[in-house]
Image: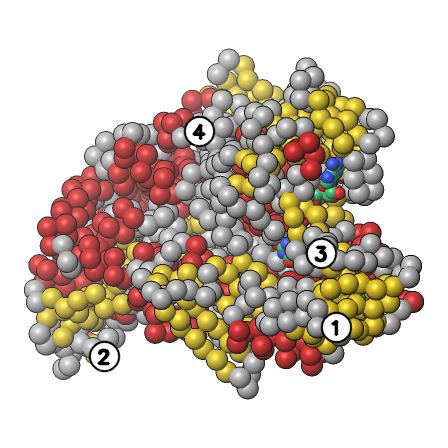
Amino acid sequence: MSENWIEVGNLNEIPALGARIVETQDGNIAVFRTKDDEVFAVRDKCPHKGGPLSQGIVSGKKVACPLHDWKINLDSGEAVAPDEGCAATFPVKMDGDKILLSLTPNEGCPNS
Amino acid sequence: MKEKLVLVGNGMAGVRTLEELLKLTPEDYQITVFGEEPYGNYNRIMLSPVLAGDKTIDEIMLNDEQWYEDNNIKLHKGKKVVDIDRVNRKVIADDGTEEEYDRLLLATGSKPFIIPVPGNDLDGVISFRDIHDVDLMMDASKKHKHAVVIGGGLLGLEAANGLMLQGMSVTVVHLMDTLMERQLDKPAAAMLKKSLEEKGLHFLMGAQTEAIIGKDRVEKVRFKDGSEIYADLVVMAVGIRPNFELAEKVGIHCERGIVVNDTMQTFDPRVYAVGECVQHRGQTYGLVAPLFEMGKVCANHFAKLGIGRYEGSVTSTKLKVTGIDLFSAGDFTGDENSEDLVFQDAARGVYRKLVVKDNKILGTVMYGDTIDGTWYFDLMRDETDITDFRENILFGQAHLGDSGHGDDNRIAQMSDSAEICGCNGVCKGDIVNAITEKKLFTLDDVRAHTKASSSCGSCTALVESLLAHTVGGDYSTAPHLKPMCGCTEHTHDEVRASIKAQELKSVPAVMDAMNWKTGGCSKCRPALNYYLLCQWPDKYKDDSQSRFINERAHANIQKDATYSVIPRMWGGGTTPEELRKIADVAEKFNVKTVHVTGGQRIALYGLKKEELPVIWGELNEAGMVSGHAYGKALRTVKTCVGKEWCRFGTQDSTHMGIELEKMTWGSWTPHKFKMAASGCPRNCAEATIKDFGVVCVDSGYELHVGGNGGIKVRATDLLCTVKTEEEVLEYCAAFMQIYREGAHYMERTAPWIERVGLTYVKERLLDDPEGRKAAAERFLFAQKFAQDDPWEERAKGAEAHEFTPIKKIG
Ligand SMILES: Cc1cc2nc3c(=O)[nH]c(=O)nc-3n(C[C@H](O)[C@H](O)[C@H](O)COP(=O)(O)OP(=O)(O)OC[C@H]3O[C@@H](n4cnc5c(N)ncnc54)[C@H](O)[C@@H]3O)c2cc1C
Ligand code: SF4
Ligand code: SF4
Ligand code: FES
């Protein structure tokens, strides 16, 4: 599959254990950075009631939604059991310190 | 190669240990289980409801065979281990099966005690321990009429009740002259006996069995005094004996049980033991709650985490007979130095006794209405000083000012649609279903699955009662010392003590020094950040990524991801200039809602995050700073106009309030902190539901502490009356500081004071003037580093990454 990679910024622009938003015409995408500098991109919309995941507390490879504290896995977009639901994830890759994002969501979760 | 772990005894304690282990390290061991019984693991406790016809065997299975398969556990069911070769490290079963081990876990449970009388081996003489026994009883009840249960303890009464419900005529024979003498005092036992008689059971008290008579099958039971009764079925329920036959045979040290240390290790360091078969610090146990605690500790050591010690348990008892509410815990007889607090209402069938010594609860017996059982039990285990609420304690927790869930909530009588958790809209039926269908054991499980009591927590007691009521026993009993969260075994107090003693100065340093199991979670990281800040106000660098969004963004997130801001209005007062500025900002930024808050402030709703710094800059122009309405911090000081205008005013309450707010703004606290100052006892500023409230009187200022509006209303306690404004300020600073230093993160002053006791607060603030002054100074020192307006900093460009997208596409 051919991806259309877009450069969205530098790793050091996102605080470790934090997130920044990429605004797109189809809504916001949250780009997360973990403690070990892994980067994930997830639709900025909690599968519960649409809370902005980018505003949550990041621990390990999960984020706690700021509205009602669901935990969402950053790699799969899936809510941590027993909660059920998932947020779309997007391909990201690093080119040195540059973060490249594709706007075509990964398969698996509904992208809404 | 994985290490090999073998479990002997496929019962509640052993399998629970495996479950805990799998949670910690799913991959470390190759696990094999031997069970004498031909099933997976089931909930032995629930055999009583099965016998009573309330449950089926299927419903009480905890881990079916699929579970063993899913977790790669080899199960040898229906095989009894008869030998252990400790030199070559292998176990041998009765059919010859052998398995090697690196570590061995013995969880062989106990055996029913069979009284040594002639005829005890006749057909129709059984005990009550496993599925097989229940099958025999069910079968007998179809063919026979007369049952005799020997033993009037918990197990005997549950057996008797079940057999009666299966249609038999049942006589309970008891050696003592009161029932359940190990759990109940005389009055409660008498009430119990009366209720059971009304249900249709017969009793023979003070009767010593001499022989069981019959040809092949039992026909009669004869007693010491020569009398006899008919019996087609005899159930012996006179007690249990730890089953350490196997351990003893292979030379592992046993006394009344398999002797283990605080890490559940036997005298052979490769062999561990948990459950009813062990003897720990001279004690043996016959209830599941302590066995589960043992399992947790043991799993911890298997996972080589090396933390966690089992230090013994205090247990409580309930009887699982529908329609009978009974609760007992601790020492309920007392001695010459203890006192009894008793409440009895014979007409309603209610009895409560608390045994108290030095104002601490030693034990309790309750009959008829046991909703406060868990509360008394917690007070007992935590050795809480009850001086401050002793006069009301017998009326229950509902009488301590809890208006959220009143006295009328009688768990058992509540309808299924009754709402238990108002925050998450969870009703009784949901919780009961989740407990039974998902086989939940603990409060945490119920929280995870239903969300009940996971938000504000005010319904915790109700959920615990419901859990106890639904599953029986004392499942819900949380461990004595609660760890901060799943990431650590340490309690809040231990963590705080280490931060101080070991001079830990960052979140990772604490996690490192205290063996955190993970990199932290959204529960412990904010707590650690606060503890560090409180301990090292001048040196600690705040970790904003460990803060909840509101504190990170200095505004309140709303459900549509917009924010609200509330500027500070000192003591609730404002000026035309400020109001004009607020109006301008509201118009310019298209503010959707302007709202006057309960704390005498004006809130602007519906703001975009990106615009916040600009808005703050404009508010700053009119001299307005952050109101910290978003923080676990000093929120507001509410005042009335007092003596300046009001004809009843006794002091200048407005001025007092402003001074308090100037001194305390910007301080971080374990939970939000609110104040008020009223000009006279008419108390228009509602000072008696604040964390710290001042009520002006002719002679000076009454200081009130520990009040709370919100979900669970609590009126303040009067601390003292002082004469001058300076004293008010000093007491306030000192009170805030001891709260900041002593409370657990997310604990408001109300529960904190209930936990430590008003007496403690008075000792620190009234009896120790030096200590009070020192605390006030520590507070003021910390304030030097806290009183910078976060809005101004951000309006000038600080933390810009927090407020702007990294990229806009299209
Ligand atoms: C009817 C009833 C009601 C109860 N109600 C309550 C209650 O309300 N609250 C409460 O807290 N507790 C209650 N209990 C007690 C509770 O069930 C026990 O405390 C608990 O089951 C003990 O767990 P355990 O793992 O130590 O032993 P068990 O659950 O008995 O497990 C031991 C297992 O090991 C097997 N085994 C033994 N020796 C060998 C061997 N050599 N080889 C292979 N397998 C072996 C046994 O067959 C058994 O399956 C009740 C018990 C009964 C019988
Ligand atoms: S509290 Fe007293 S002084 Fe203050 S407004 Fe009310 S009546 Fe007046
Ligand atoms: S503002 Fe307070 S009372 Fe109102 S809905 Fe929100 S949490 Fe509930
Ligand atoms: S919207 Fe995310 S938890 Fe409710």
- Distance Cα–Cα, label 4 vs label 3: 50 Å
The residue sitting at 52% across, 51% down in the picture is: B478
Residue A28 located left or right of residue B751:
right
Q: What's the mark number on residue B226?
A: 1
Image: B740 above or below B105: below
- Distance Cα–Cα, label 4 vs label 1: 66 Å
Subunit bearing disc 3: B
Which of the two labelled residues, at mark 4 and mark 3, occupies the earlier sequence position? 3
Q: Is mark 4 within 8 Å of ligand 1?
A: no
Tell me the crowding category of disc 1: few under 14, some 14 to 19, or many 20 or more residues within 10 angstroms, Cα based.
Answer: few
| Mark 1: secondary structure | loop
Q: Which residue is mark 3?
A: B115
Q: Is mark 2 within 8 Å of ligand 2?
A: yes
Which of the two labelled residues, at mark 2 and mark 1, occupies the earlier sequence position? 1
The residue sitting at 36% across, 48% down in the picture is: B744
Q: Which residue is mark 2?
A: B682
Residue B267: tell me if it is visible: yes
Query: Residue type at mark 4?
Result: Asn
